[in-house]
Structures are given as structure tokens and as C-alpha cells.
Image (cartoon, rainbow, N blue to C red):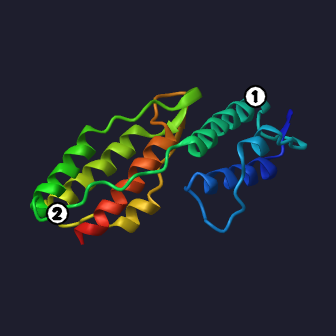
Amino acid sequence: MRSGYDPVEVDALIGRIEATLGRGPRDVERVTADEVRTATFRARRGGYQETAVDFALEAFVVALETMVKAPVRLAMAEPTGEMLREEWFEGQAARVERVAFRPGRMGTGYNEDEVDAFLDRIVATLRGTTDYPVTAAEVREAKFATVMFRAGYLIADVDEFLAGIADVLEQRA
């Protein structure tokens, strides 16, 4: 058995990264891109393969930096007396159908099929065509598998878009 990075230490850092990106418990200490860049791990027999971990951490650095640079989300136009409420929600459903996320960087991103299926549920909720509507809380707590070395959606793009849709769904109730 060859040596590699200590799995306990790597998993702890990835847990903090996931929490920082909004996909983990909120009571975990947040991490910065610089902390990830300078992270070191002890070697353990049977540990994680160093190159794979380094590659994944670099992708996380990009996601963390993208999250920091993301512009502040502006409130979407809300229904007014001039626009019927259902027309407004139909417009929001069409916006969800048209969204195009950038591909994940360095071969890492959210599983496209999982995200697309969730967006379909959101569209049905906005149109009122489902018996099982998605709530704003479910959108905020949504978790998707992270893929590596194959097509996936840029994590920060999906998270930012879903945060805006959660605000819309709060008005649907």
C-alpha cells in the first residue's frame, strides 16, 4: 500500500469548503481560497492519491474565488398592479427554462441531470401544475452530486441562480 494524504484531514477541509459554498452545515468554520491553496496534509499509508486531491482542491479554489467575486444579487421585478400575478410567475418559469449555466472548471461541477430535474420541478411549481410543489426552503437546502472529469454545471452559477429562485418561490406561497 502506498502513502497518500490523510483522508481525515482532507475530508475535514472539504467539509469546510462545502459549507462555505453553501452545501453543508452552516455551523462549520468557513474557509477562504487562500487557506485551501496553502493547506497541507500528513501522509498516511493508504491515504488519498495526492494528484487527485490537489486537482480537486484547485477546482474548489476556483469555486471559492468565483463566489467571492459574484455580484450582489439584485431583486427581481415583483408582480405589480399592472402585471397579473400568474403572468409574472409564468415569466419566472420561462426564465428557469432558459437558464444556461457555465460548465464547471477543471472537470468539476454539479451533476447536470440532477440540476435539470430539480429545475423541472421548480418550473412545475411556478406554473402551479404539480401536486408536489417545491418550497423556497427546499431550494435553499438543495444538494447535488459533484462530478469530476465529466460535464457538470459551474457550482457558483447554480447556487446563485437557485438563491434568486428561492426568493421567487416565497412569493408563490
Q: On the rendered structure, is 3 left or right of 127?
A: right
Q: Which mark is residue 80?
A: 2
- Percent position of residue 65, x then y: 63, 39
For residue 126, above or below residue 69: below
**Quadrant in the picture for the N terminus:** top right
The picture quadrant where one finds residue 45 is top right
Element at badge 1? helix
Q: Residue 126 carries which label?
A: none
Give the residue at x 86% y 43%. Answer: 41
For residue 80, above or below residue 70: below
Which amino acid, mark 1? Thr
Give the residue at x 30% y 49%. Answer: 119
Q: How far apart are marks 2 and 1 (CA)?
A: 54 Å
The picture quadrant where one finds residue 16 is bottom right
Q: On the rendered structure, is 72 left or right of 124?
A: right
Element at badge 2? loop
For residue 23, above or below residue 170: above
Residue that badge 1 annotates = 51
Give the residue at x 46% y 49%. Answer: 159
Number of the front mark, 2 or 1: 2
- Percent position of residue 2, x then y: 86, 32
- Percent position of residue 99, x then y: 31, 39
**Quadrant in the picture for the C terminus:** bottom left
The picture quadrant where one finds residue 114 is top left
- Percent position of residue 123, x then y: 22, 52
